[in-house]
Amino acid sequence: TKIAILISGRGSNMIALAKAIAAPDFPAEVVGVLADKKDAAGLAIASDMNIATTSFERSDFTSKAEHEAAIHDQLVQWNADIICLAGFMRLLSANFIDKWTNKIINIHPSLLPKYKGLNTHQRAIEAGDSEHGCTVHYVTAGMDEGPVIAQAKVPVLSDDTEASLTARVLEQEHQLYAKALRDVLERQKP
Ligand code: GRF
């Protein structure tokens, strides 16, 4: 199964996922890492891992539709079967998603359906939550919606700062994504 990973930034989830997929018993391969930012730090790291990389900046296209068409064409060229969003900070249109039904998955740093969107860790602290975590889910047209594939929980400690909680969740994210992808591949077996 061919996996493409979409990023916008440092790509720590992409790196963890690519490393897990590189294990000999993992039934998939990473065919490319695509960013919506030319200077996304994760691109250089993917390149060092001998993974094909490319970037498509929104500002180089006249419309969202044309930007997405370029991304779509690249994914088709890579023969991608599954698209993993890993810190890809752009909302994909229904038109794009409809071409990849049940093929796009995302990781989000909260226990969805709680805290869609940004600043999830700060919101969990402010709400006084005793638990927080991360979710891997199928991507549908709504932001951070779509069926949950897997979640990992962490405790929120009384002395947590946004930074300490972010780090605790990120550690779980790095393990959860590969585990969830395995589940997806298992479910999609003919
Ligand atoms: C992660 O927390 C991910 O869950 C969120 O954005 C962050 C990306 O971090 N969607 P990285 O680029 O994977 O390091």
Image (tube, helix red, strand yellow):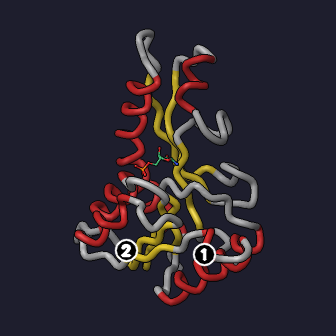
For label 1, count other residues whose C-alpha is less than 10 Å away and answer few (under 14), some (14-19) or many (20+): few
In this view, the residue in front, 121 or 53, is 53
- Vertical side of 45 occupied by 130: above or below: above
Say how many tags the image has.
Answer: 2
Report the residue at 32% width, 58% height from top: 15
- Of callouts 2 and 1, which one flags the residue occurring earlier in the amino acid sequence? 2
Under mark 1, the amino acid is Asp
* Residue that label 2 marks: 30
Under mark 2, the amino acid is Val
* Residue that label 1 marks: 60
Q: Is the CB atom of the residue marked by disc 1 within 8 angstroms of ligand 1's nearest atom?
A: no
Residue 175 in the image: state x and y as whole percent: 36, 47
Q: CA distance from mark 2 to mark 1?
A: 26 Å
In this view, the residue in front, 121 or 2, is 121
Horizontal relation, residue 38 to residue 71: left or right: left
Residue 141 in the image: state x and y as whole percent: 75, 60
User: Which of the numbered marks, if any, corresponds to residue 43?
Assistant: none
Report the residue at 42% width, 71% height from top: 33
Mark 2–mark 1 CB contact (< 8 Å): no
Horizontal relation, residue 115 to residue 15: left or right: right
- Indicate the secondary structure of the residue bearing disc 1: helix
Task: Look at the image and tell me whether residue 98 can be seen.
Answer: no
- Identity of the residue furthest to the top in this view: 158
Quadrant of image for the N terminus: bottom left
Residue 19 in the image: state x and y as whole percent: 27, 62
Report the residue at 41% width, 11% height from top: 159
In this view, the residue in front, 82 or 8, is 8
Horizontal relation, residue 38 to residue 104: left or right: left
